[in-house]
Amino acid sequence: MPLRLIFMGTPDFAVPTLLELAAHGHDIVAVYAREAKPAGRGMTLQDTPVAREAKRLGIPVLTPKTLRTPEAVAEFQAHDADAAVVVAYGMILPQAILDAPRLGCFNLHASLLPRWRGAAPINRAIMAGDSESGVMVMKMDAGLDTGDIAMAERLPITDAMTAADLHDALAPLGADLMVRAMAALARGGLQLARQGEQGVTYAAKIDKAEARIDWTQPARAVLRHIHGLSPFPGAWTEAVHDGETVRLKLLRCELASGSGAPGELLDDNLSVACGDGAIRLIVVQRAGKAPMTAVDFLRGAPLKPPLRLS
């Protein structure tokens, strides 16, 4: 039996869930997304990915600045929804909104709760060296990702995965999970379990001040730092080449053999020594330039030992 749903989401990560719910026949009566923002060279207002898809599907889109006014709550209640589905919406829902749908509000979260509650679970899982991640459907309460868990799917994290890779793997996995959760909810069979108190961690929003690479760390920690911040904001380092300080974002790398002083370039293939072990750079980006492979980068900037990155 299809449900009458409100969908709340903003970025690319939320789009597969919106599309799958619509494809499975649910009546999505309204989509809530964050406001359009200026972007591009002309700084013209551009809809968020979810707003664009909703308009393409002919679903009404609302972009309120706040949900805390009586008018916003009344408008939300007027949709007369069975449930709300929330995926990376980007705004805290007040209790009056949480209470409005008949069956509740359900969030798709990109971590294995209670690990990595908060804003940046994908980045933090990679940066912390976690061996797995996943998605969970949670019935929302007033806390920060503290609600009861309905369903979960797990996914291994390899050292080769960047934040973009994990994002792209979790988004369709989460969409399928939410479709199954809403099907169970519709037939009255969705079971909830309280989150455990053990292993609670918080995925704080990424601060650009974290992005500079510390070459004194072990090679695997440096690799996970680089991959956890790729592509945004991008872990970075500096080198002095021909008297010029060059800033490089490092977007993809792999573990390599060799050792040396932290940050020391070990060969002509961009292998760099860490505090313990070494990594080899695979994709880099100079300021104002597009990302490029290390091979292409070296054609224009032949960096060789005894150069040192800092």
Image: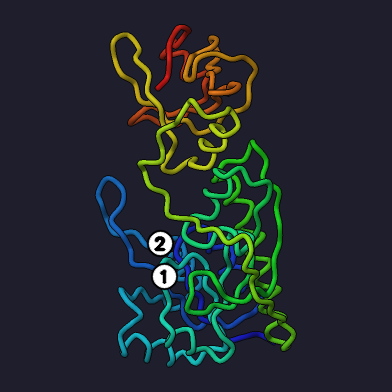
Which residue in the structure is indicated by mark 1?
Answer: 33
Q: Are marks 2 and 1 in contact (CB under 8 Å)?
A: yes
Q: Amino acid at mark 1?
A: Ala
Q: Residue at x 61, y 21 (%)?
A: 277
Pick whichever, 106 or 278, lies toward us: 278
Res 74 quadrant in image: bottom left
Which residue position is annotated with label 2? 48
Q: What color scheme is it?
A: rainbow
- Residue at x 27%, y 45% (from the top left corner): 41
Q: Image check: 166 left or right of 217?
A: right
Q: Is residue 13 above or below residue 251?
A: below
Give the mark nearest the N terminus, 2 or 1.
Answer: 1
Q: Mark 2 packing: few (<14 Cα in 10 Å), some, or many (20+)?
A: some
Amino acid type, callout 2:
Thr
Question: Secondary structure beneath disc 2?
Answer: loop
For residue 182, side relative to residue 15 (left or right): right
In the image, taking residue 197 as reference, residue 54 lies left or right, namely left
Residue drawn at (60%, 73%) of the image: 138
Q: Nearer the viewer, residue 117 or 83?
A: 117
